[in-house]
Image (cartoon, grey):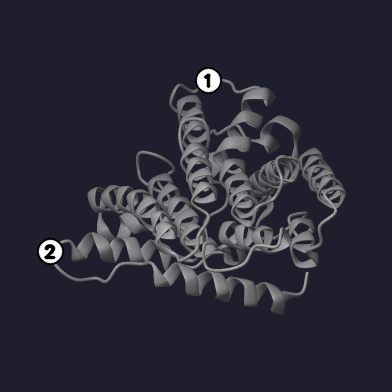
Amino acid sequence: MNESDMKVAQLRAEEVILKYLPEEKGYPSTVISAINYSVKAGGKRLRPIFMYETFKMFGGEGEVIEPFMAAIEMIHNYSLVHDDLEAMDNDEFRRGRKTTHVIYGEGMAVLAGDGLLNMAYETALNAFDIKGVNKSRVINALKILSGKSGINGMLGGQACDVDAEEKKRDVDLDELMYIHENKTGALIEAAMKIGAVLAGASKEETEKISRVALLVGTAFQIEDDILDVVGDEKVIGKRVGSDIKNNKITYVTIKGVEEAKKDAKEMSEKAIELFDSIGRENDFLRELILSMIGRTK
């Protein structure tokens, strides 16, 4: 896809996210600093971009999308802060720099993650203050955001992943797909579904875009498993081989690199086929979905 278009989309998302970050002042300034450090580490900003582009595709207008763009990135970053902790993956680097717990300590990193999760809902609720907002759409968007972040979404997928690792038990393909669909897929699904709902898409359109997002999210995580084996640390910005080191069962350990690549490609192509069947146009979003195939970072 066109790199300059992607850069514009990332800068737009970045501007929205930074607008909702707290000032580093007062007695809790250390935890606020840790929060801002984790969010300002950069990243692809895929979830807010997916949300905004889906909103546009279904004819959405106005600022109602912005609090939700910031909120979903806060939730994503809280999960990364906690994921990097010694009790979880014990990663020292993310996005090319030291992780939050390495800089601020374990306890403060836990609180920073908690703070980001709470801030996400505080931020999303700002949508009600926007003049002329459709309140029922905002309520539905909040239900999606909270549901897909919790035990029936991202948290549930992460919990299964941790449980399997701690108990050193075998994970079959069905459970691994559940982990991938929820740990990674759920927030991408939430992003696109919220974009559709806030724009006033029909129930059928919303269901279709949700299925597209789930395929995209799952393919994205499979590609992540592949990169942990064959990726370049300098390009990715974090260490590779951590899954093997932790004896973690991944899509690659079950099916091998080549089969994993094939399956990720098929999922992405199926997502495009379903996307095209909706009958709405957004060339950038379509290209973004296609770029999930064979990524290097």
Q: Pointer 2: residues within 10 angstroms few (<14), some, or many (20+)?
A: few
Number of numbered tags placed on the structure image: 2
* Vertical comparison of 273 with 168: above or below: below
x then y, percent, for residue 16:
48, 70
Q: Amino acid at mark 1?
A: Arg
Identify the mark at residue 291; answer none if there is no mark: none
| In the foreground, 6 or 160 | 6
Q: Is residue 95 left or right of residue 109?
A: right
Q: Is residue 266 above or below residue 133?
A: above
Quadrant where the N terminus is found in the figure? bottom right
Residue wearing tag 2: 27
Secondary structure, mark 2, is loop
User: Could you tell me the amino acid type at mark 2?
Assistant: Tyr
Above-or-below relation of 121 to 287: above
Left or right: where 289 falls relative to 116: right
Q: Residue at x 81, y 50 (%)?
A: 275
Eye-nearest disc, 2 or 1:
2
Secondary structure of residue under mark 1? loop
* Coordinates of residue 96 in the picture (x, y in percent): 49, 66
Q: Does the residue at mark 2 contact the one at mark 1 (Cβ under 8 Å)? A: no
Classify residue 35 as left or right of residue 232: left
210 or 219, which lies in front?
Answer: 210
Q: Quadrant of the C terminus?
A: bottom right
Using the numbered discs, state the Cα–Cα distance from disc 2 to disc 1 in whole angstroms: 44 Å
Q: Earlier in the sequence, mark 2 or mark 1?
A: 2
Rendered image: mark on residue 169: 1
Q: Position of residue 239 (x, y in %)?
A: 52, 55
Q: Residue at x 24, y 59 (%)?
A: 31
Residue ID at (19%, 71%): 25
Q: Residue furthest left?
A: 27
